[in-house]
Amino acid sequence: MINATRAYPVLAVANLDSAITTYTERMGFHLDWRDGDAFAAVSSGPVALFLRQDAAQAGSARVVVNVEDVDATHAAWVSAGVTIVDPLATRIWGMREFVAADQDGNRLTIGHVDESEADFSGITWSEADERTETPDSTEQRGHS
C-alpha cells in the first residue's frame, strides 16, 4: 500500500525561461527554485509544478489543479492573456472548470468541485467528456 503525501507533476517545456515567465507573470505561480537551464519549480499554495526543458516532449502534460475561486482565476488568466482552450463551465460531474494551455501546449484544467453538488454515480468517462453543463443548464444532472 502506498502512503503518498504529495505529487509533483513534471511538465516538459521547449524553453525554460519562456515557461517561467508564463507560469509566474501570467498564471500567478511563484518561482521556488531553478537549476540552470534544465529544471525549475513553480508553486501556488500547496501545489507545485516542475518545469523541465525538453523540446522533444514539450506540450505533452495534462494537470488538474483545484482552486478556491475558479471564476476569479479564469478572469485573471484571461486578462493576462493565458490561452484558454476549453471555456469555463460546470461539468456534469460537479466541477466548475476551464482548460488552459501554456506556451508549449501543456494543458492545465483549473477548477473547483462543490462537494455538495458533485454526483459521480452512473457517469462514465466517455459520457463526461461529451456532456458539459453551463451555469444556467443543470437539467443534465437531473435538476429541474
Image: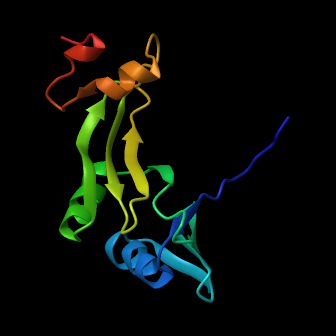
Examine the image and state in which quarter residue 76 appears.
bottom left
Which residue shows up at 39% across the image and 33% down it? 114
Q: Is residue 117 in view from this perspective?
A: no
Above or below, 30 against 2 in this view is below
In the picture, measured across the screen, residue 1 lies left or right of residue 95, that is right
Which residue shows up at 41% across the image and 25% down it? 118
Task: From the top left corner, tell me how far across and down residue 27 is, in percent.
Answer: 36, 68
Q: Is residue 10 in view from this perspective?
A: yes
Work out whether residue 14 or residue 115 is closer to the camera in this orientation and state it.
14
Quadrant occupied by the N terminus? top right
Task: From the top left corner, tell me how far across and down residue 82 is, in percent.
Answer: 27, 65
Examine the image and state in which quarter residue 11 appears.
bottom right
Which residue shows up at 45% across the image and 79% down it? 20
Work out whether residue 33 or residue 117 is closer to the camera in this orientation and state it.
33
Task: From the top left corner, tell me how far across and down residue 109 is, in percent.
Answer: 40, 48
Above or below, 142 against 52 in this view is above
